[in-house]
Image: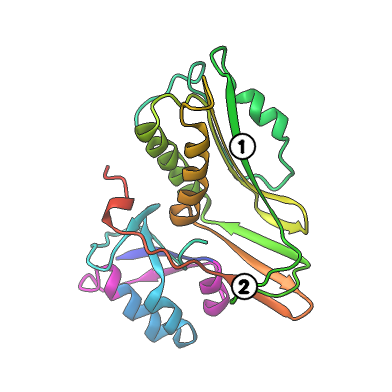
């Protein structure tokens, strides 16, 4: 059985590779067995593999899940449905490396009925007084498991629509690559006919949910070194979309 294994963020550093191909015995056909196999082959990454999240073919996977020939399995640290009428309920999902024009995004999710748009935009901090972070940051480096990240952004939008039916437009954007202090890093915007139709709550939910299930990580760089920032949310069965 031949599978492709992808590593992201801290795992990529520990394993010394972003992607490998493995030929496995048919008996070793579970995510748990693959963890053990990789730990034996790459002892430098064993501790990280033990606690890493997993995805099979761009959906969250768990140790009991079975593997098949040709699968793509990804390991990574915790991350810091239905058709939509794009004219009436526009959606935007992007992973750009270039700066984002906020006015363009607001215009893109505004319809004839829109009377309110709530936009959250995160930025790179130069100083952080929080355990696990560098006190002074020169720049951040963002990376993503891109196909899965876009799929999970769409899942977040579907969850927003299930909770706030009057929300019209949704934009979820995460920049990748090197970003300096003050640069915009992430954006979640929602539009609705009125300000009390859920756009505030939906935008807040969107950014919080992005940081739980969308596989994006950042590395802080500063005068005292560099460090990958990992989250503590561990997805469960309810966080994956069954095909």
> How far is disc 1 from disc 2 in space, using C-alphas?
26 Å
Instruction: Give how far across and how far down residue 33 sits, in percent.
Output: 27, 75
Secondary structure of residue under mark 2 = loop
Q: In the depicted view, which residue is nearer to us: 156 or 64?
A: 156
State whether residue 34 is above or below residue 177: below
For the residues bearing labels 1 and 2, Cβ distance under 8 angstroms: no
Quadrant in which the C terminus is drawn: top left
**In screen coordinates, is 24 left or right of 146?**
left
Disc 2: which residue: 130
Give the mark nearest the N terminus, 1 or 2.
1
Disc 1: which residue: 119
Q: Is residue 14 magenta?
A: yes
Instruction: Give how far across and how far down residue 127 sits, in percent.
Output: 74, 68
**In screen coordinates, is 13 left or right of 27?**
right
Quadrant in which the N terminus is drawn: bottom left
Q: Residue furthest front?
A: 196
Image mark for residue 201: none
Q: Is residue 195 magenta?
A: no
**In screen coordinates, is 47 left or right of 185?**
left
Part of the protein shown in magenta: 9-33
């Amino acid at each position: 059985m031949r599978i492709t294994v992808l590593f992201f963020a801290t795992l990529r550093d520990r394993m010394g590779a972003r992607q490998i191909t493995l030929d496995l015995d048919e008996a070793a056909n579970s995510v748990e067995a693959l963890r053990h196999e990789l730990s034996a082959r790459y002892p430098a990454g064993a501790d990280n593999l033990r606690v890493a999240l997993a995805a099979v073919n761009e959906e969250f996977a768990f140790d009991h899940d079975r593997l098949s020939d040709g699968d793509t399995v990804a390991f990574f640290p915790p991350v810091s449905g239905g058709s939509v009428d794009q004219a009436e309920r526009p959606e935007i999902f992007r992973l750009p490396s270039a700066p984002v024009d906020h006015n363009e995004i607001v215009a893109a999710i505004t319809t004839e009925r829109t009377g309110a748009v709530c936009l959250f935009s995160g930025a790179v901090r130069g100083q952080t007084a929080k355990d696990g972070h560098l006190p002074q940051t020169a720049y951040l480096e963002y990376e993503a498991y891109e196909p899965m990240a876009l799929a999970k952004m769409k899942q977040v939008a579907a969850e927003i629509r299930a909770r706030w039916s009057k929300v019209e437009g949704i934009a979820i954007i995460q920049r990748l690559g090197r970003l300096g202090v003050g640069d915009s890093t992430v954006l979640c915007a929602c539009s609705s006919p009125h300000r009390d139709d859920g756009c505030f709550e939906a935008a807040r939910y969107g950014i919080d949910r992005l940081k739980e299930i969308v596989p994006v990580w950042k590395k802080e760089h500063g005068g005292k070194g560099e460090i990958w920032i990992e989250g503590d949310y561990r997805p469960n069965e309810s966080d994956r979309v069954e095909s």
